[in-house]
Amino acid sequence: MKGNETRLVEFMDGSKKRFVIPVYQRNYDWKQENCKQLFDDLVKIEWEMVWNDI
């Protein structure tokens, strides 16, 4: 897998996106608070990137 930098908004945009959870992470039990924390962290990073571009 090759990673590259992109904005969260651009990454999430589009109806043809497909998110795959790797086999080694499938046994991890994500509760709602874990998902919220991840989402909040991603939004925070995106806002920091936006403000740094100004």
Image (cartoon, rainbow, N blue to C red):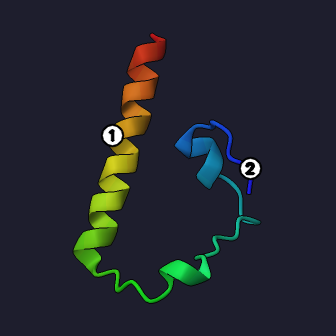
Residue displayed at 76% across by 66% down: 16
Q: Residue 44 shows which numbered tag?
A: 1
Percent position of residue 41, x then y: 32, 49
Dividing the picture into quadrants, the one containing residue 28 is bottom left
Tags 2 and 1 in contact by the CB under 8 Å rule?
no
Percent position of residue 54, x then y: 45, 10
Percent position of residue 37, x then y: 27, 60
Give the spatial CA distance, label 2 vs label 1: 24 Å
Dividing the picture into quadrants, the one containing residue 34 is bottom left
Q: Residue 54 shows which numbered tag?
A: none
Classed neighbour count for the residue bearing mark 1: other residues with Cα under 10 Å, few (<14), some (14–19), many (≥20): few
Q: Residue furthest front?
A: 24
Give the residue type at disc 2. Lys
Give SS at disc 2.
loop
Looking at the image, residue 19 sits to the left or right of residue 30; the answer is right
Mark 2 vs mark 1: in front: 2
Percent position of residue 53, x then y: 48, 14
Q: Is residue 36 above or below residue 53?
A: below
Residue displayed at 63% across by 36% down: 5
Q: Residue 2 shows which numbered tag?
A: 2
Classed neighbour count for the residue bearing mark 2: other residues with Cα under 10 Å, few (<14), some (14–19), many (≥20): few
Q: Nearer the viewer, residue 18 or 4?
A: 4
Q: Nearer the viewer, residue 7 or 25?
A: 25
Q: Nearer the viewer, residue 28 or 14?
A: 28
